Each structure stands twice: as C-alpha cells, then as structure tokens.
C-alpha cells in the first residue's frame, strides 16, 4: 500500500484484510484482496487528504475489492459516526473502538 509517498503494509489473514494508513492501493495489491469477507480500510474524513483515503475514496476502493463487509477506520474527529453513517452504501460502515470482527460465514453479521 502507499501512505503519501511511503510504502506501507496491509495485512490479509484468511478472508479478513486490514489496510489502514493508506491513500493508494496499487493494482497488484488489489489482486491480493479478492474474496474477502471483511475489509478494514482507512477512511479518514470526507475531504481529500495527502496520506489517507477520504471516505469517498475508501468507498470506491471497497467497491473495487468487493468484500462482503467493509469497516472504515482511522476516522477523524470531523466525522460523526451516528450522523454520517447514512452516507455510506450498504456493506460499508464506520468501525468503532473495541469492535471485534471475524471472517467466515458470520462475517456479514
């Protein structure tokens, strides 16, 4: 993954991937993210940022990846979890502190 102009790591364990601190996923990395149950993805804020995906950029990346469920993380204070959740498409949600996710058949719950 790319974080501004720095290479960073994303992690995939089974059908769950964790891709935060990124504003660009190279094409060859998209290939490694197909077939996910859960994608945890950087979605800092609604306006563009130089080193993080905006919410709209994260949604576009999530659609391209096609995970069953996408959780946006690394969220800035200007995003209202409750107030802005209705701006997200089905299958995409804001993550929250203490949240636990599992891959597999229960991943969409």
Image: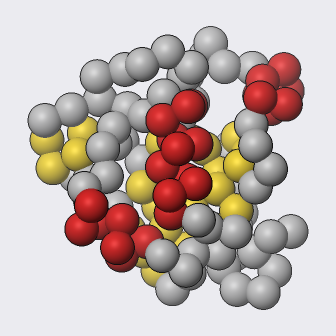
Residue at the spot x=81%, y=80% of the render? 106
Residue at the spot x=13%, y=41% of the render? 6
> Would you identify the image quadrant in which residue 12 lies?
bottom left
Location of the C terminus by quadrant is bottom right
Residue 80 in percent (x, y) is at: 75, 20
On the picture, is 2 further left or further right than 39? left
Residue 79 in percent (x, y) is at: 66, 19
Residue 50 in percent (x, y) is at: 28, 22
Residue 58 in percent (x, y) is at: 51, 41
> Would you identify the image quadrant in which residue 35 lies?
bottom right
Q: Of 99 and 2, which appears nearest the observer?
A: 2
Asked if residue 51 is positioned above or below residue 34 in the image, the reply reads above
Is residue 27 among the parts visible in the rendering?
A: yes
Residue at the spot x=29%, y=66% of the render? 29
Q: Of 96 and 72, which appears nearest the observer?
A: 72
Is residue 96 among the parts visible in the rendering?
A: no
On the picture, is 93 further left or further right than 2? right
Residue at the spot x=50%, y=58% of the render? 64
Asked if residue 40 is positioned above or below residue 38 in the image, the reply reads above
């Amino acid at each position: 993954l790319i974080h501004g102009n720095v290479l960073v790591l994303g992690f995939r364990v089974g059908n769950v991937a964790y891709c935060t601190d990124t504003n660009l996923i190279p094409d060859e990395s998209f290939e490694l993210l197909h077939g996910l149950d859960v994608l945890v993805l950087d979605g800092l804020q609604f306006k563009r940022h130089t080193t993080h995906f905006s919410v709209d950029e994260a949604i576009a990346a999530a659609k391209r990846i096609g995970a069953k469920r996408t959780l946006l993380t690394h969220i800035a204070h200007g995003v209202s979890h409750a107030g802005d959740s209705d701006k997200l498409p089905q299958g995409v949600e804001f993550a929250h502190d203490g949240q636990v996710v599992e891959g597999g058949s229960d991943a969409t719950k």
